[in-house]
Image (cartoon, rainbow, N blue to C red):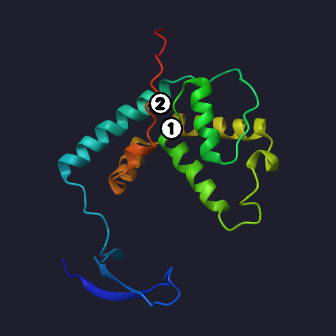
Amino acid sequence: MQSDVTTNPRASDDSSSSDVEAEISDGDGFLPIDRPPTVSEEDEVSLLMRAEAYQGYMKELPLPTSRGSLIPFTRWVGLGMSIKELYGQPLHYLTNVLLQRWDQARLGGDSEDQSLDLIIHPLKAEATIWLVEEIHRLTSSHLQIAELWGSDPMYHMLIDPIIPKLSQS
């Protein structure tokens, strides 16, 4: 396999420097040189098995049928933490990732400093999280989850430790 080295000028966070990022082409596209090391086959199999068990477990968890109360919140991640505490249920890894991205998307916006519960009614916000949670629990592929985990060495930080007991039916 032949690799070509090219440069990719990108805007730097520091406006006083002009960083250039080198990339390596593997024939399918460009891969950044600072890319995390690839996961070994053994680790990949282990990740696949853990992701399959995780997704299977999350799929079995019933969603709460009654809502507790209005939850004040300033950030999406904060609302997610309150929901976990109130209902004693974990949120799916992908839901946690999405809540973080929603918070990041507010940075630099007009409403960045405004409490979210003044922008979005708390009941609507909670219902939105549960809808997204249902989608992630019921339709996510363990293959996709394993791929995401393999590219994120800190993925375990977004997997909730709350483990409710499943009812035996």
Residue plotted at (36% across, 47% down) = 146
Left or right? Give the position of 89 relative to 17.
right
Pointer 1 with pointer 2, Cβ within 8 A? yes
Residue 77 appears at what percent x and percent y?
59, 45
Which amino acid is tagged 2?
Answer: Met
State which quadrant residue 135 falls in.
top right
Residue 102 appears at what percent x and percent y?
63, 54
Please rate how many residues cluster around mark 2, counting C-alpha atoms within 10 Å: few if below 14, some from 14 to 19, many from 20: many
Depth check, front residue: 121 or 149:
121
Residue 73 appears at what percent x and percent y?
70, 42
On screen, residue 54 above or below 103: above
Q: What element carries label 2?
A: helix
Left or right? Give the position of 27 relative to 103.
left
Which residue was labeled with disc 1? 92
* Quadrant for the N terminus in the image: bottom left
Residue 58: image tag: 2
Residue 41 appears at what percent x and percent y?
19, 51
Which amino acid is tagged 1?
Answer: His
Q: Is residue 63 visible?
A: no
Q: Which of marks 1 and 2 is nearer the N terminus?
A: 2
Q: Can residue 45 be seen in this view?
A: yes
